[in-house]
Image: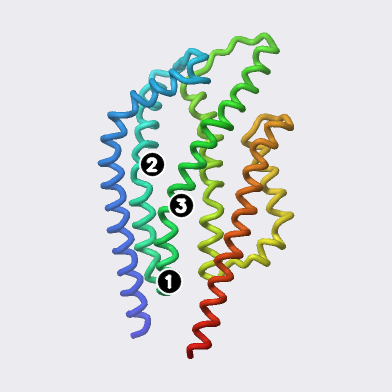
Amino acid sequence: MKRIEETMTLLGHLTELRSRIWKILIVVLLSLGGGLYLSPKVLRYLKSVPPGSEMTWNVFSPWDGIRMYMSVALVIALAVSLPFILYQLWGFVKQGLHPGERNAALRYVPYSVICFFTGLAFGYFVVFPMSFSFTSKITKSMELVETYGVAQYFGFMFNIVLPLAIAFELPVIVMFLTKIGILTPKALHKMRRYAYLVLVVVASLISPPELISHLLVFVPLVVLYEISVLLSRIVYGKRKAAALAEVSGA
């Protein structure tokens, strides 16, 4: 009997998951319509501002143009759909959370969206131009002709911008994990040296191979980590105070 109930529960979760995935797909497809309309405008804008305005975009395959058109449209659709996607994910996992954890997860959804777009902006307006300028100078110093394919250009951009956008989610993730009791400020303090090592590796991978560029990427990542530690202390203190008040009230 117990096994039958567990099977029914599992089937119920799978049915709900399928329903939420379909809702996400419908919203993404609807957003994709807007993305297809905006994609040429976005491409023209990126072509009109540095470093896009400093080069001729080439295609090396008949599919390069349509691939970039669809890729930009999909990125726009996913960006527009992100709040809805996060809300659906929260709706699916909330059944396994306590009431306090549910409120925390829902409250952090808007902050995660803000942090993601902040990371995108920092990556595109700061790190990407710096990285492209560095590689362009090296190319010119070797007396090579800069002939860039549009697919390679956007691939280079996405490899820099997307990791930074994800890295900017760190404070929100740390706050949530602290809120539900998985992380503590003490644990983050112990992990600091290892975290810094990981941040050094990340900064070296997404920035040009010279000291100033490494620092321009590494320092914001360190600041993000330290902000995460500070926020973890605040959340942990409130959580501990709430637990003591509950015990005292009992």
Place residue 122 in its image quadrant.
top right
Q: CA distance from mark 2 to mark 1?
A: 27 Å
Against 175, residue 157 (above or below) is above
Element on which disc 2 rests: helix
Q: Which residue is mark 1?
A: 97
Against 2, residue 99 (above or below) is above
**Residue lying at the far bottom of the rendered structure:** 250
Q: Residue at x 52, y 31 (%)?
A: 125
Q: Are marks 2 and 3 in contact (CB under 8 Å)?
A: no
Residue type, label 2: Ala
Lower position in the chain sequence, tag 3 or tag 1: 1
Q: CA distance from mark 3 to mark 1?
A: 19 Å
Q: CA distance from mark 2 to mark 3?
A: 12 Å
Residue type, label 1: Leu
Residue 51 image position (x, y, % from top left): 52, 20
User: Mark 3: few, some, or many residues within 10 Å (few <14, many ≥20)?
Assistant: many
Instruction: Using the image, tell me which numbered label, if any, was put on residue 79.
Output: 2
